[in-house]
């Protein structure tokens, strides 16, 4: 008997059903710390809602829509189908049902929606905005140059309006792109290294103007304020003080490694959730580097798609500056899930390319 729906789409919707059930039940099994932000957003204790910056805008959104007054289970029931539909519209590869590294990574990312976006969350708004990027790269409605300019302008606007550090994504992605044009032997590593260099330069320049370097004024300051709290067991704190140029340089590199190649996370051997994250993040980063290398080898064919990798690795580098702990790092990656999903399946969306 022939199925009315492809096996891959069936697997996707079954996975989506699991996500929905896990999301609805999340308040009954997730630790209380998973809901700290959600409670602040929903309750708006100090009447902070407004039209500028992430918390006020998110509070305003949940107030206007009425979602903030609902139970978290109902919020999950309404929010998660929207996100699952966005991924579905982006495309389900023909081989999505097969057990491969690529698919397992995609499954895990989608499952995490239940843990991080099943309640009032800034990631819900970020997810919807970021989805614009892979759709532009996939549909290719505009010329190549217009597409990239539109993506850059969108990120700048979103950064100025909602999440300031998104302003840095186009700058670092542009540097990685330029580096990829130079005939280096190891273009993947060279591109990431060049991105780190420009991130360090931007942070030091910010320090000259403001008196505090970027990671010093964000990650390090926040971790000092939260010292001793439960959420800080996976805190990312540089071994060197970041109040000097060399300390900040080391801090940026240390942060990038801690977030994206977190081998230092193995010191938490008796905390299985952290060890699980370490393995997951290592596999994700290394596999994306592998796909990026393959995409670079055929950059003329994938001239649009390769920009997903420039943007993803730019974001990973920025996370090394701002992320206070490993939990936040995972949560914020779910905010860019559409872009990660597109990068994982960059070679699967074109009709003229066998999947």
Image (cartoon, grey):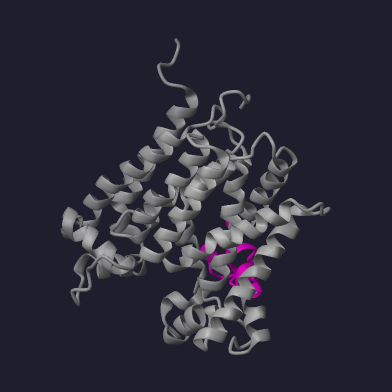
Residue most extreme to the right:
185
- The answer to whether 157 is drawn above or below residue 200 in the figure is above
Q: In the rendered image, is residue 239 in sight?
A: no
* Front position in the image: 87 or 160: 160
Measured from the top left, where is residue 246 in percent x and y? 68, 85
Task: Give the residue displayed 63% in from the left and 39% down from the top.
Answer: 303
**Magenta stretch contains residue 269:** yes
Task: Give the residue displayed 44% in from the left and 52% down from the top.
Answer: 112
Task: Give the residue displayed 24% in from the left and 64% down from the top.
Answer: 59
Q: In the rendered image, is residue 268 in sight?
A: yes
Quarter placement of the C terminus: top right
- The answer to whether 17 is drawn above or below residue 9 in the figure is below
Measured from the top left, where is residue 94 in percent x and y? 54, 27
* Front position in the image: 197 or 97: 197
Q: Is residue 81 left or right of residue 300?
A: left
* Front position in the image: 64 or 109: 64
Measured from the top left, where is residue 191 in percent x and y? 71, 58
Q: Is residue 104 left or right of residue 226?
A: right
**Magenta stretch contains residue 181:** no
Quarter placement of the N terminus: top left
Q: Which residues are magenta?
A: 253-280
Q: Is residue 300 left or right of residue 109?
A: right
């Amino acid at each position: 008997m022939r199925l009315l729906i492809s096996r891959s789409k069936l697997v996707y919707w079954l996975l989506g059903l699991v996500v929905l059930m896990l999301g609805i039940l999340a308040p009954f099994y997730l630790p209380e710390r998973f809901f700290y932000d959600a409670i602040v957003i929903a309750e708006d204790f100090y009447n902070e809602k407004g039209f500028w910056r992430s918390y006020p805008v998110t509070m305003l959104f949940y107030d206007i829509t009425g979602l903030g007054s609902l139970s978290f289970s109902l919020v999950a029931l309404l929010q998660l189908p929207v996100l699952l539909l966005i991924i579905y519209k982006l495309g389900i590869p023909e081989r999505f049902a097969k057990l491969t590294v690529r698919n397992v990574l995609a499954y895990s990312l989608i499952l995490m929606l239940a843990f991080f976006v099943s309640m009032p969350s800034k990631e819900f708004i970020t997810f919807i905005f970021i989805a614009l990027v892979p759709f532009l790269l996939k549909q290719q409605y505009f010329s190549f140059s217009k597409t990239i300019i539109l993506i850059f302008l969108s990120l700048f606007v979103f950064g100025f309006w909602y999440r300031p550090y998104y302003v840095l994504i186009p700058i670092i992605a542009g540097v990685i792109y330029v580096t990829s044009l130079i005939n280096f032997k190891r273009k993947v590593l060279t591109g990431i290294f060049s991105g780190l260099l420009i991130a360090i330069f931007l942070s030091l320049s910010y320090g000259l103007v403001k008196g505090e370097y970027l990671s010093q004024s964000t990650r390090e300051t926040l971790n000092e304020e939260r010292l001793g709290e439960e959420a800080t067991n996976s805190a990312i704190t540089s071994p060197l003080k970041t109040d000097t140029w060399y300390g900040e340089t080391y801090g940026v590199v240390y942060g990038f490694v801690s977030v994206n190649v977190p081998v230092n996370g193995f010191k938490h051997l008796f905390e299985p959730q952290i060890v699980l994250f370490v393995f997951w993040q290592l596999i994700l980063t290394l596999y994306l580097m592998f796909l990026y290398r393959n995409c670079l080898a055929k950059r003329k064919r994938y001239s649009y798609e390769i920009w997903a990798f420039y943007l993803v690795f730019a974001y990973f580098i920025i996370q090394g500056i701002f992320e206070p702990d490993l939990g936040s790092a995972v949560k914020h990656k779910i905010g860019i899930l559409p872009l990660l999903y597109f990068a994982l399946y960059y070679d699967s969306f074109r009709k003229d390319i066998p999947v």
